[in-house]
Amino acid sequence: MSPDRNSARPLPAFSRMLRLTRPNREDVIALVILAGLGVLFFRAGEGAVAPLSTLRLEPVQLNASYLPYYALRTVLRMFAALLASTVFTLVVATLAARSRRAGQLIVPALDILQSVPILAFLTFTVTFFMGLFPGSVLGVEAASIFVIFTSQAWNMAFSFYQSLRSIPVDLEEATQVYGLSPIRRFLKLDLPYGTPALVWNAMMSMSGGWFFVVASEAITVGNTTVTLPGIGSYLAVAIERQDFRAVAQAVGAMALVILAYDQLFFRPIVAWADRFRFEMVASTERPQSWVFDILRRTRLLPVLLAPLGAIGRLLLAFEPRVARRRAVDSRRSHPAFEWLWQAFVVTAVLGALLLTGRSVMRYLEWHDVVTAVLLACLTMIRVLVLIVLASALWVPIGVWIGLRPAWAERLQPLAQFLAAFPANVLFPFVVIGIVRWNLTPDIWLSPLMILGTQWYILFNVIAGASAIPTDLREAADMFHVRGWQWWRQVAIPGIFPYYVTGALTASGGSWNASIVAEVASWGNHKLVARGLGSYIAEATTAGDYARVGLGIGVMCVFVLGFNRLLWRPLYAYGERRMRLT
């Protein structure tokens, strides 16, 4: 064998692996970022497992030097809730979309849970969580995380459910032809197809959680109030003491936190999720993220994560195979079973309503029910008007942003901040303005209801517009489709399912926010707008739990009826007539 041939001998596999995995500059940067985030996580976790007595010994202080630590604790709660919401969404929404019988129970349950006020969850769950971890801050932290979870999960679940319901028929048939099992179908089709919209709704849900962060960090058990350290509790103390400087500091800290997790978390995920867009022609404009670029260029990170991928492939290898089926499965359940299932669902709902009504009417009269229904009608009028106005404003803006990824990157942090802006920060200015100009609270307190929920419409429309296939947009440009024709044939079919999801969630959120928005106070001034929200708020303050239960029940009935009579038919119409594929 000649020396030349010896010199051309390939490197051994181990040497080649060492050469390819030699750390580079991106590895160092990624290591520093991940190590820093790990240190912050454990620093915040120390306070979460401390004894409960530390909350009394270390009360929330209006000192700007404490804000970084408070912000860290709040962000840890919100990301824990986001993780729980994501797992809940992937399980529950997939089950509702893939099983018609399960969907008949899950979708109405989500409608009802979305309508239940956030504070109602806190009332019933705080004792349970504190009992799980007696004498520890972790119990109160779990109750706070659960409250934030209830402000995030329903929107994400509806978004993923809508995505699965709008999967193109040819892809559905392909999974049946190749005999994919439910798990492989979820990993190969459902999850990739629903990821882009889910990411945008996760951003919206994260921002929406800030709306209730004040309530979630002040836990009341009987006559005792436990205040967790965080930006929400800092803001609540500042508002109570009428300290405008501390309020401005809290809002500024919140803006910096949103900018940080947008750059380090959401923008990389948006850039990564763009690969799952369903289109025949690749878009020339892609979302950019400096963090995603660094992680993509690392050499050690793929090696460290390789065992996880190998474990997943090993588990799938032991999964039983499914026989190939025809593209269209015409088998249906027997009509008798369908009739029995429908009868069971109706009986269960009527039984629950009967038991609830009997327990409430032991303490109330029928005129109380009539009063609650009339007040609910007033709140419903406000919700309808506000949804129409918000749609007229944000649908054109959302389409414009969604079709321009470069502008979406610039405006994404601003939109998240505006969506996260706590409405109670504006209460002093609203109260002062209404009192100063002698305005009508029934009208001028109403915009506070939509302040935090209008962004569901914007974020969903942006997600829908960005999902419009590039080849369809290019064809519209080629054939000079303009004006109303472009909206009717391209934009509206593309965004319609996403808009319905956003409007449905914004509607339910507005009902929920009415409890906070229809009663505003600052100093000695208290303004009340007539409606179901103020009815529940005043009954809660008075300790009249019978009327609180009545108000929550009436709100659930109205929201469920609203969804059944308006939003669900629009969902079905979108599935039949407003599909691009």
Image (spheres, rainbow, N blue to C red):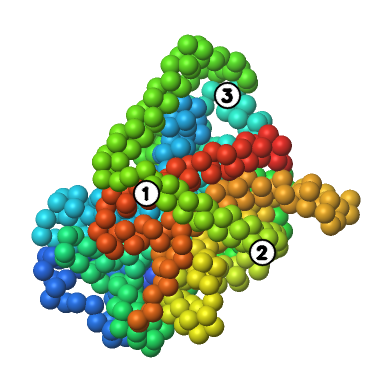
Tell me which residue sits at (30%, 73%) in the image: 233
Q: Is residue 84 visible?
A: yes
Dot 1 corresponds to which residue?
Answer: 368
Between disc 2 and disc 3, whose residue precedes?
Answer: 3
Please, what is the three-letter code of the amino acid marked with disc 3? Answer: Gln
Residue 75 position, x and y percent, is: 35, 67
Query: How dense is the environment of label 2, judged by Cα within 10 Å: few (below 14), some, or many (20 and up)?
Result: some
Q: Is residue 338 left or right of residue 351?
A: right
Query: How dense is the environment of label 3, judged by Cα within 10 Å: few (below 14), some, or many (20 and up)?
Result: many
Between disc 1 and disc 2, whose residue precedes?
Answer: 1
Tell me which residue sits at (68%, 34%) in the image: 576
Residue 425 position, x and y percent, is: 43, 76
Tell me which residue sits at (14%, 73%) in the image: 56
Q: Is disc 2 placed on a helix, strand or loop? A: helix
Residue 11 position, x and y percent, is: 47, 52
Please, what is the three-letter code of the amino acid marked with disc 1? Answer: Asp
Q: Which labelled disc corresponds to residue 393?
A: 2
Q: Is disc 3 placed on a helix, strand or loop? A: helix
The image quarter in which residue 32 lies: bottom left
Q: Which labelled disc corresponds to residue 176?
A: 3
Label 3 near label 1: C-beta < 8 Å? no
Query: How dense is the environment of label 1, judged by Cα within 10 Å: few (below 14), some, or many (20 and up)?
Result: some
Please, what is the three-letter code of the amino acid marked with disc 2? Answer: Leu
Tell me which residue sits at (51%, 41%) in the image: 561
Disc 1 to disc 3, C-alpha distance: 55 Å
Q: Vertical placement of 61 versus 530: above or below?
A: below
Q: Is residue 494 left or right of residue 514?
A: right
Q: Is disc 1 placed on a helix, strand or loop? A: helix
Q: Nearer the viewer, residue 210 or 181?
A: 210
Q: Is residue 23 visible?
A: no
